[in-house]
Amino acid sequence: MRFVTVKSIEQQDIQATHRVRTEIKDHRNAKANQIRGLVAEYGLVAPKTLLALRRAIPEWLEDAQNGLTDYFRSLLHGLWDDLLTLEDRLKKLDKEIETLARSNEVAKRLQQLRGVGPIVATALVATVGDGAQYSKGRQMAAALGLTPRQNSSGDRYRQATSSQRRGGCTGKQDCAHGLGHATQRHRLRSKPQHMLSWKYEGEPQ
């Protein structure tokens, strides 16, 4: 029987930081979607990215000919302030995570891996510590929930995809994104230069 390793106080602090960050990030995305939905009722649509939405909202507020009423403009201004507040809070937490990553030796070693930045490194430290409790990489991957789901029965073997929300890893989605960045960059580097129509410059998470 395998037992879960007791987390240290430092791991608990890092895990709490990640959980607060995830919650604020979800609130930020929900607020952005709320703004999109309300503004769309007036016939105004912005591209899907948050960057495009941040550029579009001030333009909507300043344009007096876009069909928005004065009352809705006041509502939109309040929603815009809420979105900026959430983004400022998210940036502060990112800086705190960077500070935690610089002060932890395991996190500093993890960041030497391709595709691993402060967020992924501290998430792994919070979840598995130094990883000494695992004898194989497969054991650690299974504990993090990064292995594909199994839907096998009898002589039938069914292997599904790995869900980013399955498993107990703090910041598992960020781990999956970091792995995706590293994989994509490796694939592009293995192709001849004349076959590349664009250059991928994904930042480690």
Image (cartoon, helix red, strand yellow):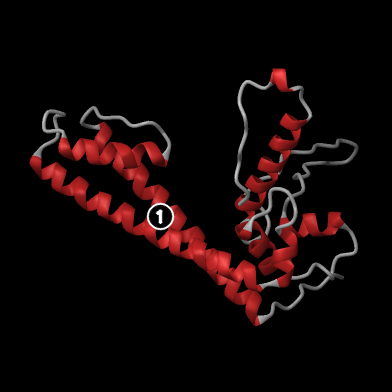
Residue at point 84%, 70% (across, down) = 133
> Farthest front residue?
193
Q: Is residue 71 left or right of residue 37?
A: left
Residue at point 68%, 72% (across, down) = 104
Coordinates of residue 1 in the picture (x, y in percent):
87, 70
Which quadrant of the view contains residue 155?
top right
Coordinates of residue 55 in the picture (x, y in percent):
32, 38
Residue type at tag 1: His
Coordinates of residue 151 in the picture (x, y in percent):
77, 42
> Farthest bottom residue?
9
Coordinates of residue 10 in the picture (x, y in percent):
64, 78
For label 1, the residue is 27
Q: Is residue 109 left or right of residue 132?
A: left
Q: Is residue 125 left or right of residue 19?
A: right
Above or below, comparing residue 33 to residue 194 in the picture: below
Which quadrant of the view contains residue 53?
top left
Q: Nearer the viewer, residue 88 or 16?
A: 88
Residue at point 74%, 56% (across, down) = 112
Q: Is residue 128 left or right of residue 136?
A: left
